[in-house]
Image (cartoon, grey):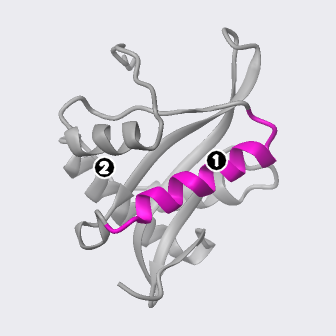
Amino acid sequence: MNNINLRYVKPNEMDQLVDLCEAHAIFERAEFIKEGKSKKLLNDLFSKSPELFCLVLESKNELLGYMSFMKQYSTWHASNYIYMDCLFLKDKIRGKGFGEKLMKKLQEECKSLNCDFIQWQTPDFNKRAIKFYKRMGGISLNKKRFFLY
């Protein structure tokens, strides 16, 4: 695909971003509730001091993928790091180098935010993502992630 732009999401794209989040949840075999997400994301991404950031891949006003991340602190490392919360690409652009472009942009953001490393997770069944992350230099730790609501 030609003319795909890598940039930060815009306020008027929250509905499209939520649609991508829903597709991502379906891909990861997870539940997703759309209600109220556009408004919440708009507030969280565009407040005076946002803690959440979102890069998108866009072509002809269509969002084709996204990566969300935030700055966090690691007690173990005694330093700041970037936590990549989500990385998702629509099928039609997978395997064409766009995930790598997003990861390289995130590495730039990591340096500009004075962070020492990037951390993320992926489901253990997502073998294609695991292979991609290892190719990008990612190192995996065997842990289970728990949620308490």
Asked whether residue 143 is in view, the answer is yes
**In this rendering, would 54 be left or right of 60?**
right
Q: Count the marks: how many?
A: 2
**The stretch drawn in magenta includes residue 2:** no
User: Badge 2: few (under 14), some or many (20 or more) residues near its Cα, within 10 Å?
Assistant: few
Q: Amino acid at mark 2?
A: Ile
**The stretch drawn in magenta includes residue 111:** yes
**In this rendering, would 147 be left or right of 57?**
left
At x 40%, y 17%, the residue is 141
At x 70%, y 11%, the residue is 75
What x and y, as percent, mark residue 87? 42, 51
- The relative height of residue 37 versus residue 6 in the rendered view (above or below) is above
At x 30%, y 53%, the residue is 24
Helix or strand or loop: what does disc 2 sit on? loop
What x and y, as percent, mark residue 5? 53, 79
Stretch of the chain drawn in magenta: 96-115
- The relative height of residue 68 versus residue 75 in the rendered view (above or below) is below
At x 43%, y 65%, the residue is 98
Who is closer to the viewer here, 96 or 56? 96
Q: Amino acid at mark 1?
A: Gln
Q: Earlier in the sequence, mark 1 or mark 2?
A: 2
Who is closer to the viewer here, 149 or 76? 76
Q: Quadrant of the C terminus?
A: top left
Q: Quadrant of the N terminus?
A: bottom left
What x and y, as percent, mark residue 146? 36, 16
Q: Which residue is mark 2?
A: 33
Who is closer to the viewer here, 106 or 149? 106
Q: Which residue is mark 1?
A: 107
Asked whether residue 40 is in view, the answer is no
- The relative height of residue 6 versus residue 147 in the rendered view (above or below) is below
